[in-house]
Amino acid sequence: MDRSALRRSAAAALLAVGSVTGVLALMPGSASAAQIGTLAFTSLTTQDSPFSVTTSAGCPDTATNFQIKVTGGNIPATAGNIVGNTAGATIASGINAGPFSVPVSNTLRVFATNNGLSALADGTYTTTLICRGLLASASQGDYVGTFVVSGGGAKVTPAVPSTST
């Protein structure tokens, strides 16, 4: 192999490694940090009701973004977030100074449909608001709340968060 071909091969290898690294940095993180508080739900009564979540405190000062995921019940492990990676600046009060509320634009039924389900099945579901950086996949702290779907999917009852964090 001549020098020119060797250089091209080395450049191609570096480009491939750089591309894979860049893609991995943009992927949502699956690792969870410690739970730093709880989530309360507002107006969550059915799978078709718009709702919001409120944290019990603010995200760490180093967090600039957040995302919200729902797990449990019949939600596939590959399900997307109900609220994707969002800049904290979209919240009027910010996300670092104290408790903040996030209006969820999708209802639970829309979230279920987006993940290949007609609705959420009866069961207990966990909602996690993840404090994070813009591109960092690691959580900097999680707020967790649960709700129960019952009555053949017709009723949703948020669990009352405990006061301990």
Image: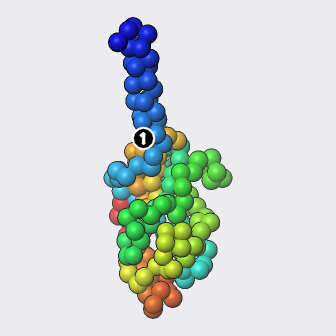
Where residue 15 sits in the image (x, y, percent)? 45, 26
Which of the colour schemes (rainbow, by chain, secondary structure, one colour) is used? rainbow
Q: Position of residue 2 (x, y in %)?
A: 38, 9
Picture coordinates of residue 40, whole percent (x, y): 49, 69
Residue 113 position (above or below residue 36)? below
| Residue nearest the observer in this picture, 32 or 112 | 112
**Residue 110 visible in this rendered orientation of the protein:** yes
Q: Return the residue found at the far bottom.
A: 151
The quadrant of the rendering that contains the C terminus is bottom left
> Foreground: 4 or 14?
4
Tell me which residue sits at (59%, 68%) in the image: 106
Q: Is the N terminus in the top left, top right, bottom left or bottom right quadrant?
A: top left
Residue 97 visible in the displayed image:
no
Residue furthest to the front in view is: 1
Q: Is residue 64 left or right of residue 143?
A: right
Which residue does the numbered mark 1 point to in the structure image?
24
> Residue 135 at x, y = what percent?
49, 40
**Residue at the spot x=39%, y=76% of the render?**
74
Q: Amino acid at mark 1?
A: Leu
Identify which residue, 19 or 110, lies in the foreground.
19
**Going by the picture, which residue comes out furthest to the top?**
3
Residue shown at 41%/84% (left/top)? 122
Q: Secondary structure at mark 1?
A: helix
- State the image quarter where residue 21 is shown: top left
Q: Residues within 10 Å of mark 1 (few under 14, many from 20)?
A: some
